[in-house]
Image: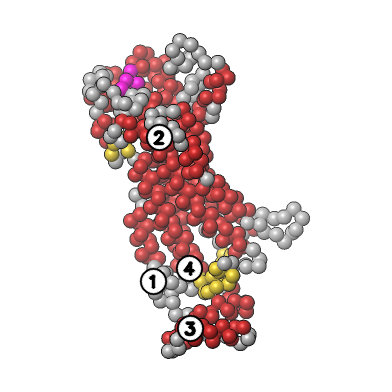
Amino acid sequence: MGTLWSKGTSATQIVEDFTVGNDRVLDLRLAKHDVIGSKAHIKMLASIGLLEQEELEILTKGLDGILDEISRGEFSLGDDVEDIHSQVEFLLTQRLGEVGKKIHSGRSRNDQVLVDLKLFLREELEIIRDEMISLFNTLQQLSEKYKDVLMPGYTHAQIAMPSSFGLWFGAYAEALVDDMYMLRGAYNIVNQNPLGSAAGYGSSFPLDRDMTTELLGFDTLNYNVVAAQLSRGKSEKAVASAISQLALTLNKFAADCCMYMCPNFGFIKFPDELTTGSSIMPHKKNPDVWEILRGTCNRIQSLPNEISLMTTNMAHGYHRDYQLLKDVLFPGLEQMHKCLFMAKYMLENISVNEHILEDEKYMYLFTVEEVNRRVLEGMPFRDAYKSVGIEVNEGKFSFNGELNHTHKGSIGNLCNAEIADKMKKAAF
């Protein structure tokens, strides 16, 4: 079959292996999107007279056949084919004859891979959005279920003030709203049509770029053809930054769970089948799922930096370095899906300790409550603070009052409905 873009001389195998790397495997993730992009492109070509209607129908039927093979998992790249774009064109030419070669008119592999990537990343972001909303709903449900169950709050890893499971679960639900803003920002960057920018300087064909924008469901165009090519690397970094932000939220929640599962805390537990044991200590129930999730999220947080380093010091236009971004981002996206799934799965099986504060070591949680009570009775804050501090130092402190947290976002007023409305507005 040979190399589609050969100029009459072939690179040595060692050079080809090095430059292609893992790209052929990763390109299979783009197969569906390459065909969808090609279908829109040929429909546009027919509209401007570069394809006859009969040719359009033949090519569309051929592309639909390839798309069906992809959906059935029967599509693969030939051993001597360098990328997904070449494979699709080779198959069309092999099956349809000379008309198959016309599919590439008016575009370059540069804008072809860009449109493939943007369609792929857009779909990935939509899936992550739905996974985030599902996790958000689970956290909100747990927040409501346990809104009256108190737990200790910590600062500097020291016992601080009263918190609640409702406040804890609800905090991570609202943190996901911030992550959704980031995800939406990445989506807006990705959801622009680069098709028609060709190799980065446009085409002398009268391409109808508005038509392909509409056919492919993009919000708008990358209008300037050079700017379209500048979006390579920027799109990947925007997505990496968004999932990195999400990974930070999941990382902190996983760290909390690892700590709270420890018997010294004993705040939460999970069924035995969701924990692991020790090879020599029969009492152990290790938080392996949360530890792997925590570590995986740390890896995901490194993605924006890795992409930044890979895309630095390149002048505008296409460079082969960009190919390596798939090696970085594609596995990261797969890891993100797994982390979101496992976080929700674990939360669906969580049990909370509803009697934590019966332990006398937590009585100092209520010093601030006592200070505030005395202030409300008329004592200056500094005097109230000092008097309670003296009682603590002398071992005389006790608190028998009730918690009176009523302001928005506090233990007694979680504002889960308002947070749900925020998420609804943040989602795209």
Among the two numbered marks 1 and 2 on one chain, the one whose residue lies closer to the N terminus: 2
The residue located at (56%, 83%) in the rendering is 389
Residue identifier under label 3:
382
Q: Residues within 10 Å of mark 1 (few under 14, many from 20)?
A: few
Mark 1–mark 4 distance (CA, rounded to whole Å): 14 Å
Among the two numbered marks 1 and 3 on one chain, the one whose residue lies closer to the N terminus: 3
Mark 1–mark 2 distance (CA, rounded to whole Å): 43 Å
Q: Residues within 10 Å of mark 4 (few under 14, many from 20)?
A: many
**Residue 263 image point, x, y percent:** 66, 66
Residue identifier under label 2:
232
Give the magenta range.
102-106
Task: Identify whether 191 is placed above or below 112.
Answer: below
The residue located at (39%, 16%) in the rendering is 93
Mark 4–mark 2 distance (CA, rounded to whole Å): 43 Å
Residue identifier under label 4:
166
The residue located at (29%, 18%) in the rendering is 55
Question: Does the image show residue 385?
Answer: yes
Q: Amino acid at mark 4?
A: Gly
Q: Nearer the viewer, residue 424 or 155?
A: 155
Residue identifier under label 1:
408
Which dot marks residue 306? none
Magenta span: predominant SS is helix
Q: Amino acid at mark 3?
A: Arg
